[in-house]
């Protein structure tokens, strides 16, 4: 936890208020969780998918 706090304090958002830091970390973590869920779904259902490229 000390490493994460050090990274946040040394980053450009280190001087921002706690509310802004929380909002940015929440946004970042929600993007990461969404990408991870998409990867899991792609690995699980990918072989059954039919992908068609065209107009």
Image (tube, grey):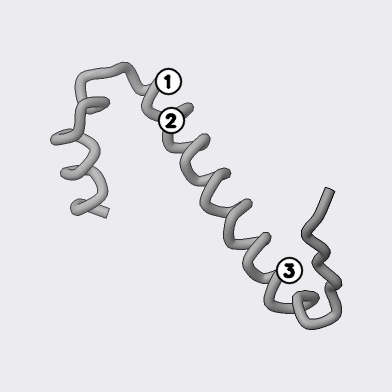
Other-residue count near label 3 (Cα within 10 Å), few / some / many at <14 / 14–19 / ≥20: few
Q: Quadrant of the N terminus?
A: bottom left
In whole angstroms, how far apart are the C-alphas of marks 1 and 3?
33 Å
In whole angstroms, how far apart are the C-alphas of marks 2 and 3?
26 Å
Which residue sits at x=84%, y=73%? 49
Q: Secondary structure at mark 1?
A: helix
User: Are discs 1 and 3 less than 8 Å apart at CB?
Assistant: no
How many numbered badges does the structure rendering display? Answer: 3
Q: Which residue is mark 3?
A: 41
In whole angstroms, how far apart are the C-alphas of marks 2 and 1?
9 Å
User: Closer to the N terminus: mark 2 or mark 3?
Assistant: 2
Which residue sits at x=67%, y=71%? 40
User: Closer to the N terminus: mark 1 or mark 3?
Assistant: 1
* Residue 28 image position (x, y, % from top left): 47, 41
Q: Which residue is mark 2?
A: 24
Left or right, 31 with respect to 18, comes to right
* Residue 31 image position (x, y, % from top left): 55, 45
Mark 2 or mark 1: which is in front? 2
Q: Which residue is mark 1?
A: 19
* Residue 54 image position (x, y, % from top left): 81, 55
């Amino acid at each position: 936890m000390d490493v994460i706090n050090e990274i946040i304090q040394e980053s450009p958002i280190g001087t921002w208020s706690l509310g802004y830091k929380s909002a940015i970390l929440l946004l970042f973590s929600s993007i990461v969780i969404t990408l991870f869920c998409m990867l899991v779904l792609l690995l699980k259902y990918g072989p059954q998918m039919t992908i068609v490229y065209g107009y």
